[in-house]
Image: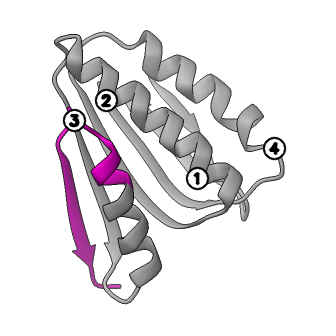
Amino acid sequence: MNTLIPGTDRTPTISFKDGVFSITGRSYMENSVEFYAPIKKMINEHDGPLQVEIGLDFFNTSSSKCLMDLLFIIDRKCTSGSECKIKWSYRTDDEDMRDSAEEFKTLLKHVPVELEEIDE
């Protein structure tokens, strides 16, 4: 399954191709639950290895909840025998995003999470 959802000034770019799921940009839309529902479904229905790449600049509270739900789905997939990993990139000067990534990482029990600082 190959999917590309172009980002806007309020929604992230979503790419899902050959077992690599990528989410980049900003996520602060009014109805995060509606936006993320089909993405959660795609991840749930995916069989096989899964690599997740996160490169968000900003997300609001409702997006945070949806992202956590999405990451919990991935974490459960790891317990069912699927090979999964998450790489979360954030700008070196973005302490808030680093703190968020570290907090999310502590909540996941099975999927390995790599945090990466990037200079931009």
Q: Which residue is mark 4?
A: 31
The quarter of the displayed image where residue 109 is located: top left
Amino acid type, residue under disc 1 in the picture: Ser
Taking the image as shown, residue 1 lies to the left or right of residue 102, namely right
| 70 and 49: which is toward the camera | 70
Image marks 3 and 2: residues in contact by CB distance under 8 Å: yes
Disc number for residue 14: none
Q: Which residue is mark 1?
A: 64
Q: Which residues are magenta?
A: 104-120
Residue 3 sits inside the magenta stretch: no
Disc number for residue 111: 3
Residue 119 location (% of width, % of height): 28, 84
Residue 85 location (% of width, % of height): 21, 38
| 103 and 82: which is toward the camera | 103
* Residue at mark 4 to residue at mark 2: CA–CA distance: 24 Å
* Residue at mark 1 to residue at mark 4: CA–CA distance: 12 Å
Residue 49 location (% of width, % of height): 20, 21
* Residue at mark 1 to residue at mark 3: CA–CA distance: 18 Å
Image marks 1 and 3: residues in contact by CB distance under 8 Å: no
